[in-house]
Amino acid sequence: MAEQKIAAVCCGVRVPASPFLNETRIERINAARYEGDEIAGALAVIGPDDRVLEMGAGLGVVGGVIAHNARPAALLSFEANPAMIPHIRALHAANHLRGRIALRNEVVISAPERPETATFFVRNSFLGSSLIDHDHRDTRAVEVPTSGWSDVVAEFRPTVLVMDIEGGELEFLRHADLSGIRAVVIEFHPGIYGRAGTRECKSILRAAGFSKLPGPSTRLVWACTREITAEPDPPGPGRAESRFLPPDPEGGWSGTLERVERARVIPPVASGHVQVAGVLRADRSYCENAGTWRNERAITLRPLMPEGPIARLEGRWLWGGILWTYFAHFVGESTARLWALDAVDAGKIAGIAFMPKRPRLGDTTQPFQRAFLDLMDIRLPIHVCATPTEIEELIVPGQGFGLGAISRGTQSTRATFRARFGRGVTADGPERLYISRSALGAKRGALIGEGELEAYLNEQGYEIFHPQNHPLEVQVARYKAARQIIGAEGSAMHVLAFAARPHQQIALIVRRRSRATTHIATHLEHFAGRAPDVIETLVHTWLPKGQQRRRLGAGELDLPALQARLIAGGFVETGAPWAALSAQAVEQTLGGRYDLIA
């Protein structure tokens, strides 16, 4: 990758050129006047033992200066504007900070009723982009995933909060429990909530025991501290790993192997998105590399060693992580450590040890799990640790694949799948294939107009293929044979990504506005070796009444626009125009059971 042009330097931090930097802003950065009060306050209060949580990363300059100069123990940055994320990552890369700063494109919500997403109003200039469209200027609304403040605190254990969130700080402070925070650096925005709002922010901080430091503080930027009599809790149950760094496709802990003697696998005792479960070493310390991450969040947290008897498993086992019985997550997450079988002597491995995602299922396995491993030419047995289990020797690989940035897979993971997946399967099928969801039913997330689309594609010589009706081996045979593949976004596209090769042309039809689309597209590009054509022509998105999970939404296709995109991509030939869906046809499909959400 070519080295990026450096536009400015602030306090030793190199700032790459980006569309957000104009001449004035570059001058201010070079003179350390850009966010100068915030930087001064942060450097005045942050020490090497601190765990810094930054809300509102902006260009990434403030976080970069903190990491480079104050060198805290950990730094986690949140930025709501998705357009800023690649430029922040470029700054981290230019300053060798990728292993020292974790970055999330999320909004932190402290209120008890937290939505899955929050509307963020993006301006042409990133300055002033906010959760609050306060002056009704020209903005673009985007939906951004959220994290709960209490969840972030439980995982990360911050000691310092640095916050510049363009007016969102008032609502945040009204609900946030600041226990464990010894210092706050905050910028106020009276232009959004008035002088009364500024006074309320300051009153909340004073009531929590914080005192403004007169040196670095100004009227609009406070650096404030308080005494915390008790030391922060040491790592204990429900704590995330000490580094708090998500898996990295470029390497880091994702490419490591750890040998743990007398490893204790502690499975979850309750279902949930985030679970207290994982691997403890013989000295009861937490084996961080055995943890599972999704997006930029650890979904397994440090467990305690339980009292009472413990099962024992003899021999040398490979750690597989969480075993999902839901096909999509099994393919996307339970396969994350299989790369290690090409890095160890597989003949000396007794099997693959997992822990269940759903405790109520115990040590249950599904036939598709075995079938998938067979396609990888992995004949090792699966052992599900449904109760606390001591394993004589456990080989713990880092997470080399999953959901999030790690959807690219590490180089070792990509090489393992390229060499192993489906190598014994002979290509068998037509040159044109459409991977359909229409037989799954509306409850699994529908694509309105898919039946009409299938009829049009059938006229163009596409086989309409329903993967759930065929063994995995047949699915792979079809995927290998096709020259052009169109697929409705879904879990089958993950299987395709493992099997496809660069000579194949793939179109991914979006059925929902979700970051899951990005995961699938990223997986396809980096494992198949060729980026898919991602085609979104949704007129509307509908959600079942009373339902909050967007993955269950129904996307309404704009068939004429879809035809144009497929013609432009060379997937179909020019022909009679595809008819738009009528309102009556859409209503008949939805049956009054859905609400319009977009």
Image: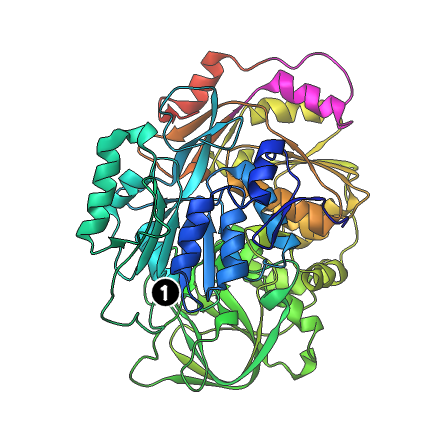
Which quarter of the picture shows residue 374?
Answer: bottom right
Q: Is residue 193 above or below residue 52?
A: above
Q: Magenta stretch containing residue 196, yes or no? A: no
Nearest to the observer: residue 478 or residue 3? 3
The percent position of residue 366, horizontal first and vertical second, equals: 51, 61
Numbered disc 1: secondary structure: helix
The percent position of residue 475, horizontal first and vertical second, equals: 67, 48
Q: Quadrant of the C terminus?
A: top left
Q: Magenta stretch containing residue 578, yes or no? A: yes
Along the horizontal axis of the image, is 261 left or right of 575?
A: left
List the single residue furthest toward the left. Answer: 207
How many numbered badges does the structure rendering display? 1
Residue under numbered circle 1: 359
One can see residue 246 in this view: no
Q: Is residue 114 above or below residue 326?
A: above
Which quarter of the picture shows residue 180?
Answer: bottom left
One can see residue 98 in this view: yes
Mark 1 burial class by Cα count in 10 Å: few <14, some 14-19, many 20+ = some
Amino acid on which the number 1 mark rests in the picture: Pro
The percent position of residue 220, horizontal first and vertical second, equals: 34, 39
Q: Is residue 341 above or below residue 467?
A: below
The residues colored magenta run 556-579
Nearest to the observer: residue 492 or residue 86? 86
Residue at (25, 31) in percent of width and height: 195
